[in-house]
Image: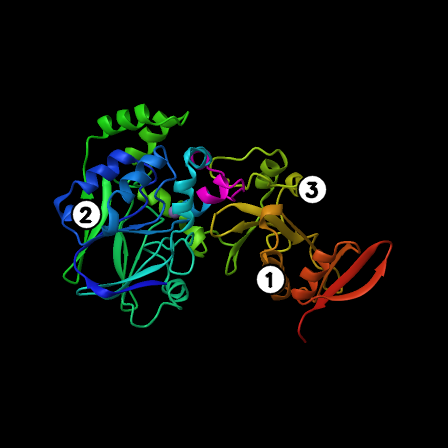
């Protein structure tokens, strides 16, 4: 955690500029920003239509600017260095290709989080997402228990946490800590203009700089080579999405249970798939509110999903679940029961994840939750089998509490029994 010992006076907080130069310039022209002792930019600097221009404008501020890493900055580095990311965002792919080695190095070196001593506040922690993860979603109405978890590792003396990522400004107390999200400079939700915040004399002020949207859209469209730039600029600079829609959309990512029947774990949502949803998945024809990883669904899943799609009404408990990564909101796998318990209380389960989601313990986390759910609804024994050549799957089952019972015909059979 970067720290400075010298107390800092007035601080302007800018976040989520997302490569929109005219919006950044409008804020930088504000007298309270020009006179601020520091300008802290809490992440997602460049993923947008003018990535290099925005990075140059920020670095031109010299010693006065403190840049914090956002998830989109991290993802730009991954893409620029030839990797892939979970989030299929075409403008990020394009922006990554615009960056020269100097810009990639700048983004790769960004710290997260950053703590600064500020007059009237003491140590203030600046982050993107949450102090522990640059892509964690916390919202103004996130539940107290979730906030407690999110802030659990923040040092006691830090009484103010300033974040970005959700593009909707708020200030609220969270169990005696002040939490500030300044909103987005370049991609605001709910209200147009460039949103930012001023920390001065122990007080936080949420600020908004209005600028000529028509002129800015023209300027972005003329300056950027992104193929879809005009539509992008129209949509985001005019704040087309309302904050109510966005909170609804982001809601499940903060662990709130918006859909009865969803099972929520530390990092995942297990969503029971209805027959119409199964039909869409098998046909690979998502609705706008379906958020699927590009590799989802994968071949193994299609047969059980096909049977589910053909049903009139699915079993609400012993069914197939779509597994979503709470951080990205994307469907990354499937897990579920191949039918209700038999006369002895035996159920069988199966699961699978897209390649990009493997190696992160998701399968164990989902399986533990599925087994708990099965036992809570009358199952006594949960069984699974796997190819004997599939060592990864066997390790997942063992880590999830299963024991190997026998091997035959190239398969290893596992089970776990309900506690007596
Ligand atoms: Mn972000």
Q: Position of residue 265 (x, y in %)?
A: 52, 60
Q: How many marks?
A: 3
- Residue 307's disc is 3
Name the front one of labels 1 and 2.
2
Pick the front one: 200 or 379: 200
Assign a secondary structure to mark 2.
strand
Q: Position of residue 254 (x, y in %)?
A: 42, 55
Left or right of 24? Residue 201 is left
| Mark toward the start of the polypeptide (1 vs 2) | 2
The 10 Å Cα crowd at callout 2, few under 14, some 14 to 19, many 20 or more, is some
> CA–CA distance between discs 1 and 2?
46 Å
- Residue 207's disc is 2
Residue at horizontal 64 percent and vertical 62 percent from the top: 371
The 10 Å Cα crowd at callout 3, few under 14, some 14 to 19, many 20 or more, is few
The residue sitting at the bottom extreme is 420
Q: Position of residue 350 (x, y in %)?
A: 69, 53
- Residue 212's disc is none
Left or right of 400? Residue 9 is left
Specify the segment rendered in magenta.
76-92
Residue 87 is a magenta residue: yes
> CA–CA distance between discs 2 and 3?
54 Å
Q: Is 46 above or below relative to 217?
A: below
Name the residue that disc number 1 marks: 373
The residue sitting at the right extreme is 409
Report if residue 240 is visible in the image. Answer: no
Q: Quadrant of residue 20?
A: top left
The residue sitting at the front extreme is 102
């Amino acid at each position: 955690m970067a720290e400075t010992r010298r107390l800092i006076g007035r601080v302007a907080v800018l976040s989520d500029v997302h490569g929109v130069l005219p919006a950044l310039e409008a804020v930088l022209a504000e007298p309270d920003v020009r006179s601020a002792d520091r300008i802290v930019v809490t992440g997602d600097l460049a993923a947008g239509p003018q990535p290099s221009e925005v990075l140059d404008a920020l670095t031109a501020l010299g010693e006065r600017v403190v840049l914090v890493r956002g998830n989109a900055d991290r993802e730009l580095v991954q893409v620029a260095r030839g990797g892939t990311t979970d989030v299929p965002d075409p403008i990020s792919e394009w922006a990554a290709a615009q960056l020269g080695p100097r810009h990639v190095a700048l983004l790769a070196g960004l710290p997260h989080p950053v703590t600064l001593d500020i007059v009237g506040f003491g140590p203030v922690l600046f982050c993107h997402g949450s102090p522990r993860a640059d892509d964690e979603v916390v919202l103004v109405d996130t539940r107290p228990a979730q906030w407690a978890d999110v802030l659990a590792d923040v040092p006691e003396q830090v009484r103010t946490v300033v974040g970005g990522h959700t593009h909707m400004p708020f200030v609220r107390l969270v169990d005696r800590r002040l939490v500030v999200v300044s909103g987005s400079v370049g991609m605001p939700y709910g209200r147009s203009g460039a949103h930012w915040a001023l920390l001065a004399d122990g007080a936080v002020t949420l600020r908004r700089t209005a600028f000529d949207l028509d002129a800015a859209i023209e300027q972005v469209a003329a300056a950027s080579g992104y193929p879809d730039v005009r539509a992008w600029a129209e949509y985001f600079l005019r704040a087309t999405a309302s904050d109510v829609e966005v909170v609804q959309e982001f809601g499940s990512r903060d662990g709130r249970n918006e859909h009865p029947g969803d099972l929520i774990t530390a990092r995942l949502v297990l969503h029971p798939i209805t027959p119409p949803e199964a039909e869409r998945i098998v046909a690979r024809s998502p609705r706008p509110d379906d958020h699927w990883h590009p590799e989802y669904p994968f071949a193994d899943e299609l047969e059980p999903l096909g049977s589910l799609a053909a049903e009139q009404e699915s079993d609400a408990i012993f069914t197939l679940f779509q597994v979503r990564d709470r951080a990205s909101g994307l469907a990354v796998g499937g897990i579920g029961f191949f039918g209700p318990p038999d006369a002895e209380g035996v159920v069988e389960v199966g699961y699978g994840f897209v390649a990009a989601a493997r190696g992160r313990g998701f399968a164990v986390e989902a399986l533990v939750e599925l087994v708990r759910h099965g036992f809570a609804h009358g199952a006594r024994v949960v069984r699974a089998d796997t190819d004997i050549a599939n060592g990864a799957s066997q390790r997942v089952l063992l880590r999830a509490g299963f024991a190997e019972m026998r091997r035959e015909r190239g398969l290893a059979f596992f089970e776990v029994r309900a506690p007596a």
